[in-house]
Image (cartoon, rainbow, N blue to C red):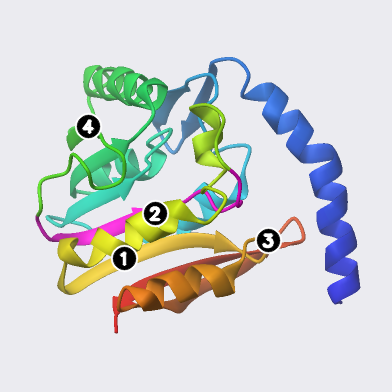
Amino acid sequence: FDMFYKLLRKSVNLFHRPRALFLISADRKYEWNGLELLIKKGVFHPGLFYSTKFLLQVIRKENLTGKTFLELGAGSGLLSFYAASAGAVVTASDISTTAIDGLKINLRHLKVMGHKLQLHILQSDLFDSIPEQQFDYMVINPPYYPKKAGNEAEMAWFCGENFEYFSKLFKVLGKYMQLNSKVLMSLSEDCNLDKIMQIASMNQLKLNLFRKKRIGGELNIVFQVVKN
């Protein structure tokens, strides 16, 4: 089975990813369950890649009413807009100016369409510009390929040659967690899970398996980050 899944993943990578990268080279419309979004050029598209929709499946099982909810690296904002529509008080952050512009456009559009959303948009490099506070929920769909990002769009894919993204994330993450916080992170068998877990452990954090699902030959995994 391992060989079968490797071949399937190779096939998906060969045909799907080049097409997906071509499609995100222009602004696109995307609709999910009544949420109509404009996905700006270069922003990680939830309809073309599996991880966002899998994380969405996971958080839909949670009761978010009245909960404080942070999405780090919100990108398209699909998770944030869903959480707000489900009654959460949401902070959607991203380092990308393009992503922030898209989030603001979509928030205005959704409000005009009658959606009642408590959602605050904040441009931030991880927690740099987020006032210290404790969130009930935090969701993270991180970049995990070990390479230095050459531009804003590549920040959605590459975490730095030495996994600098995770070092910076885990160094501060615990300060934003309370006793019952649920921190969910989407990763894949294609990333270096051992290295990421090692960095978490160095910062007194641990990644516990929460959900997993094989999609298009790739094992997508949602971990819950907890304090050691």
- The amino acid type, in three-letter code, at marker 1 is Val
State the extent of the magenta-drawn residues as a range. 133-147
Q: In the rendering, at what x and y percent does residue 147 appear?
A: 61, 46
Q: Secondary structure at mark 3?
A: loop
- Residue annotated with mark 2: 140
Q: Secondary structure at mark 1?
A: strand
Mark 1–mark 2 CB contact (< 8 Å): yes
Whichever of labels 3 and 1 marks the residue nearer the N terminus, that label is 1
Please name whichever residue, 60 or 11, is drawn nearer the observer in this view of the structure: 11
Mark 3–mark 1 CB contact (< 8 Å): no
- Please tell me whether the stretch drawn in magenta is mainly helix, strand or loop: loop
Whichever of labels 4 and 2 marks the residue nearer the N terminus, that label is 4
Q: Secondary structure at mark 2?
A: strand
200 is higher (above) or lower (below) than 30: below
Q: For the residue carrying disc 2, how many other residues have a C-alpha within 10 Å: few (<14), some (14-19), or many (20+)?
A: many
- Residue annotated with mark 3: 190
